[in-house]
Image (tube, rainbow, N blue to C red):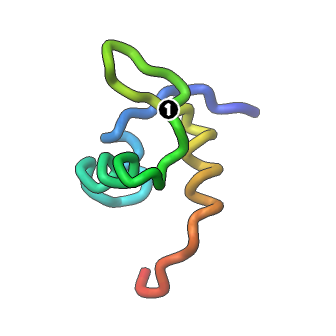
Amino acid sequence: MTDRRLWSYQDIAAHIRVQPGTVRSYRKHGLLPPPDHVERGKPYWYADTIRTWVASRPRNRNR
């Protein structure tokens, strides 16, 4: 089943347990996948896009 809900910076931050500013920084530094949708200049990602990205990220040893 595909999860096509659109997630904002805040949604992504809650999912990976960081502050929204951290997610913005990830995007600024090219660490996030490109947005799936942009509305009024604000980027959004499908939940599945973010889950795939999270699964592919190297794990932090201290977490």
Residue at 50% over, 22% down: 37
Say which amino acid is labelled 1: Pro
Residue situated in front as seen by the camera: 18 or 31: 31
In the picture, measured across the screen, residue 27 lies left or right of residue 58, that is left
**In the image, residue 31 lies at what x, y percent?**
47, 55
Q: Residue furthest front?
A: 29
Label 1 residue SS? loop
Vertical relation: 6 (above or below) 25: above
**In the image, residue 5 lies at what x, y percent?**
53, 27
In the picture, measured across the screen, residue 51 lies left or right of residue 15, that is right
Query: Quadrant location of residue 36?
Result: top right
Vertical relation: 7 (above or below) 24: above
Residue situated in front as seen by the camera: 12 or 26: 26
Q: How many marks?
A: 1
**In the image, residue 35 lies at what x, y percent?**
50, 32
Quadrant the N terminus occupies: top right
Residue at 60% over, 40% down: 49
Residue at 23% over, 50% down: 21
The residue carrying mark 1 is: 35
Q: Residue furthest right?
A: 1
Circle 1 Cα neighbour tier, 10 Å, few/some/many (<14 / 14–19 / ≥20): some
Residue at 54% over, 75% down: 59
In the picture, measured across the screen, residue 49 lies left or right of residue 45, that is right
